[in-house]
Image: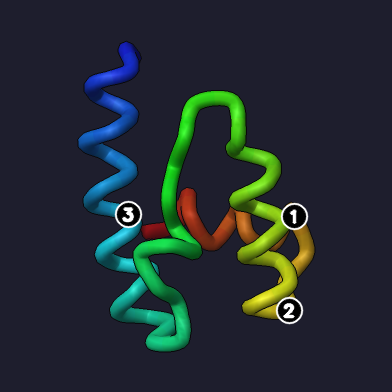
Amino acid sequence: MNATEVKGNWNDQKGKLKQKFAILTDNDLMFEDGKKDEMLGKLQIKLGKTKDELHKLIADL
């Protein structure tokens, strides 16, 4: 999977996450190269989920 596919896929997943969790903003879900862990950390705090729970939640979208 190349960077364009990941970006497109993330845009779909981002929309689904925002529908499921209304408290999330575009800023919370901003995917930047090299900052995936930082973004996941923000989501963990905001949603009260573990890293494993977030990975499963995103994979199940």
Residue type, numbered disc 1 = Lys
Q: Which residue is mark 2?
A: 48
Q: In the image, is 36 to the left or to the right of 60? A: right
Circles 1 and 3: CB atoms closer than 8 Å: no
Circles 3 and 2: CB atoms closer than 8 Å: no
- Residue at x 49% of width, y 64% of height: 28
Q: Which residue is mark 1?
A: 51
Cα–Cα span, label 3 and label 2? 19 Å
- Residue at x 32% of width, y 12% of height: 2
Callout 1 secondary element: helix
Q: Which residue is mark 3?
A: 13
Local crowd size for mark 3, using a 10 Å CA cut-off: few (<14), some (14–19), many (≥20):
some
- Residue at x 29% of width, y 67% of height: 16
Residue type, numbered disc 3 = Gln
Outermost residue toward the bottom? 22
Outermost residue toward the top? 2
Cα–Cα span, label 2 and label 1? 10 Å
Task: Work out whether residue 29 or residue 15 is closer to the camera in this orientation and state it.
Answer: 29
Instruction: Check the image and report above or below for 56 versus 6.
Output: below
Residue 42: quarter of image: bottom right
The quadrant in which the C terminus is found is bottom left
Q: Position of residue 23 (x, y in %)?
A: 46, 86
Local crowd size for mark 1, using a 10 Å CA cut-off: few (<14), some (14–19), many (≥20):
some
Residue 35: quarter of image: top right
Residue type, numbered disc 2 = Gly
